[in-house]
Structure formats: C-alpha cells, structure tokens
C-alpha cells in the first residue's frame, strides 16, 4: 500500500475529530465569504472604480482565473509537504490576498488583487478534502468532505450577507479586511486541532499530474465548467436583478443572498449521504433540476416571493452537485486525490468566470438581467450532455458506471 493510500485508508488520530473538521470548514467559510460577497458588493465596487456593473463583473472572472491557475500548480508543487501545515499556509495566503484587495485602488489593481486572492482557493479545498477524508472511515468520506464544504455554504448564509451589509455601511473595503481576520483564525485552529501527518516523500509533481491522463477527470472537469457556468450566469448579477428586475430596494440584496446561502447549507447537508450513495446520479439529477429552476427564475424573477424560493433552490442544487463532483473527481484521479479535489474548484471557478462573461454579453447586448437565467439553463443542460458522455465512456472502458 502506498503512503497516499495509507493516508486515506486509515483514519488519522485526532483528539477531537469534530473540531478538526470545524477548523477546516472555517477555512472554507473564509473562502466562501470572499468569493461570493463580491457579487453582493458589485454595485458598490463599480461605483468606487468608476465602471459599469457588467465591466466590474470581470473582477469575478479574475478571481476565478486565479483559482484555475493556483489549484494544479500549488497542489503539484506542494504534494510532498505536510498536509496540515500546507492547509494553514494556504488559508493565510488567501487572507493576505484580501488585504491587498482592501487597499487596491482602480479597476486594474482591484482585478489583479482578486487574481492573487484566488490562487490558494482550489489548492486549499484539495488539501482540506484529503485531510477530512483521512479523519474518518472510507464509507464516511463523502460526509466528511461535505462538512468541509459546508463552511463555504454557511458563508453564503452568514458571511456574504453580513459582509454585504458591512460593505454598504462602512465601505466595500471593510469586508475584505474581515476575511483577513477569518483566515488568520482558521489557520490557528487548523494547526491546533488537525492532526499532523508526516510529509509524503514519495509524492512528486509528476505523480500528481498523472490525474490529467485519466479521461474521466477531463469529462468531470468539462461538465463542471459548462454546467456550473449556468448557476454563475445568473448569480453573478443577483444584486442588479433584485433591484432592477424584482424592483426591490438595495436593502433587499442581503436578504436574497441569505436565502441563497440557506439553500446552499441545506444542499451541503444533503450532499454527504447522496455522494456516498452515487456521485454520478447525484450530478445528473442535480443538473436537470438546475435547468428547470433557472427557466422558472427567468419567468418568475419579477415577483419577489417566487424569485426568493427559486434562489433558495439554486443554492441548494449548487451545493449538492459541487460536493458530488468533489467526491467523483477524487475517485477519478486515482492516487492524485488531492489534485482531483483541487481541480474540482478549478472547474467551478472557470464556470464562475464563464458564467459571468456570458451573462455580461447578454446584458450588454440589451437583453436585460433576466436573460442571464436563460443562458444559465442552456449551460446546465450542456453540462448534462458532457457528463453523460463521460459516463458512457466509462461504461465502454470498464463495463460499468
């Protein structure tokens, strides 16, 4: 048995497994807060840097690009480092990137700082997922990983609405300073409660990159990029949708972000047992439900109550599918599980940038903010097609799902 396989097969000794998972989830909370609060603060940032909402949406793309670049590079280079210390260093780096955003002035500096902030995002979740899986028996891995990802979902309930309110009243920069504090606290808790494991001296950049030779890794990544682009095509512009389409005041934006967050938490809670049951079927059903939900949102978004219900569903389905993808990519990557987990976040953030870009195209073309939901439904449907093609390829290759 290899050292990597030993790490997964035998749970690590932790005095308090719950506190260890909480520490890792707090890192996810910091990441979720910084990733999604930009959507809620988009009009404030746009006004500060003298750009339109559609143009300022490109800073979200910059963050996503940082995730895409950082995840495979950092995980591959850090494969031989102790996991706990690497996780703590990554979350501290994210905090420092947010401090840079807080002091950046102008469109290009803000965009560059968001790119830097995104670099540790995917790598952190890759390391944290592997650490979480090492704390529990193999049949509970989906549940453990979902608890780490739950931190990201809770951020959409607490961190994002709170940071949006804070940013609206004290200036948008204050929200990014808060993320620095959260990151420092998460790093301290990880070092205190997550058990230390010796570095895997057999791990190399070449060994990690073997995951990229596996067709199922590419099928999963591509379907995640396309399918999740649907969610972000709509959600990137949730703030102007609330004010311009649903015709509510700016004070309602945090409430809609809260509703999305509650849905994300519910989805993350459900995703653990669903992923342990069948990640593939969970992805297919989740994407299909996302198509229907986004079509309904296009139709009903002018009405406050139906719009809020549908935002809740978008959040729940997003968490369910994201965690199922995480488990599937870790399995598809073979020994390079940490890279597989990190690549999930690369694909999700390519989807983030792709969705924001497609949304900006239809909005800039004069089709209105509602049209972004139609784009989202089309992308989610395309994600089903790609994922199903991957399953068919797997059947031909192995004679089973």
Image: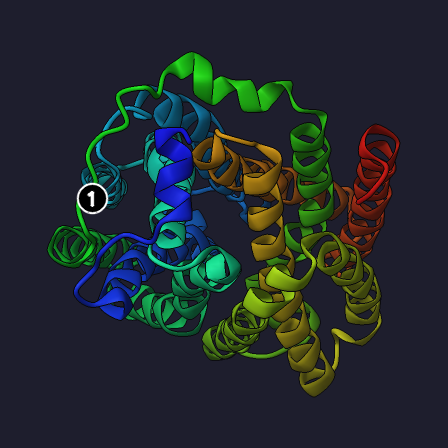
Give residue 343's position: percent from left, percent from top: 53, 34
Query: Which of 308 and 274 lies nearest the eye of the viewer?
Result: 274
Q: Which residue is at 22% across, 45% downward?
A: 95
Q: Which residue is at 36% across, 16% downward?
A: 204
Q: Quadrant of residue 166?
A: bottom left
Work out whether 327 lies above or below 318: above
The quarter of the rendered structure image containing the N terminus is top left
Query: Which of 225 and 192 lies nearest the eye of the viewer?
Result: 192
Q: Which residue is at 57% across, 32% downward?
A: 333
Please identify the residue farthest to the front as the structure is shown.
1
Residue count near mark 1 (Cα–Cα under 10 Å), binned few <14, some 14–19, many ≥20: many
* Left or right relative to 368: residue 112: left
Residue 3 appears in view? yes
Give residue 43's position: percent from left, percent from top: 47, 56
Query: Which color scheme does this rendered protein use?
Result: rainbow
- Mark 1, secondary structure of its residue: helix
Query: Which of 135 and 299 lies nearest the eye of the viewer?
Result: 135
Residue 241 appears in view? no
Q: Which residue is at 58% across, 62% downward?
A: 319
Work out whether 13 lies above or below 357: below
* Left or right relative to 121: residue 379: right
Q: Which residue is mark 1?
A: 88
Work out whether 254 lies above or below 45: below
Give residue 187's position: percent from left, percent from top: 17, 50
The quarter of the rendered structure image containing the C terminus is top right
Give residue 262's position: percent from left, percent from top: 51, 77
Please identify the residue farthest to the bottom as the structure is shown.
305
């Amino acid at each position: 048995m290899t050292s990597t396989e030993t790490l997964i097969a035998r749970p690590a000794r932790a005095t308090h497994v719950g506190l260890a998972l909480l520490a890792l989830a707090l890192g996810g909370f910091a990441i979720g807060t910084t990733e999604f609060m930009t959507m809620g603060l988009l009009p404030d940032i746009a006004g500060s840097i003298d750009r339109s909402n559609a143009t300022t949406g490109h800073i979200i793309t910059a963050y996503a690009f940082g995730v895409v670049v950082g995840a495979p590079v950092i995980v591959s280079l850090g494969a031989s480092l102790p996991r706990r210390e690497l996780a703590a260093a990554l979350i501290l780096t994210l905090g420092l990137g947010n401090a840079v955003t807080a002091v950046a002035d102008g469109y290009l500096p803000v965009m560059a700082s968001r790119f830097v902030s995104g670099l540790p995002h995917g790598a952190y979740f890759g390391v944290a997922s592997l650490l979480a899986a090492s704390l529990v028996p193999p049949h509970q891995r989906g549940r453990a990983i979902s608890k780490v990802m739950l931190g990201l979902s809770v951020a959409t309930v607490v961190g994002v609405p709170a940071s949006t309110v804070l940013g609206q009243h004290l200036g948008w920069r204050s929200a990014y300073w808060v993320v620095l504090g959260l990151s420092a606290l998460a790093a301290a808790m990880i070092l205190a409660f997550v058990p230390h494991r010796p570095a895997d001296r057999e791990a190399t950049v070449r060994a990690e990159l073997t995951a990229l030779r596996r067709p199922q890794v590419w099928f999963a990544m591509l379907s995640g990029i396309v399918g999740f682009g649907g969610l972000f095509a709509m959600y990137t512009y949730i703030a102007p949708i609330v004010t311009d389409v649903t015709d509510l005041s700016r004070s309602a934006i945090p409430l809609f972000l809260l509703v999305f967050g509650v849905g994300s938490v519910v989805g993350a809670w459900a995703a653990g047992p669903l992923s342990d049951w069948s990640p593939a079927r969970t992805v297919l059903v989740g994407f299909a439900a996302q198509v229907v939900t986004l079509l309904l949102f296009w139709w009903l978004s002018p009405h406050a109550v139906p719009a809020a219900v549908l935002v809740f569903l978008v959040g729940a389905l997003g968490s369910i599918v994201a965690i199922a993808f995480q488990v599937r990519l870790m399995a598809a990557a073979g020994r390079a599980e940490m890279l597989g987990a990190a690549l999930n976040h690369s694909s999700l953030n390519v989807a983030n940038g792709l969705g924001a870009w497609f949304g900006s195209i239809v909005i800039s073309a004069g089709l209105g903010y509602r049209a972004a939901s139609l784009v989202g439904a089309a992308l989610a449907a395309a994600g089903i097609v790609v994922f199903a093609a991957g399953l068919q390829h797997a059947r031909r290759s192995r004679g089973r799902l």
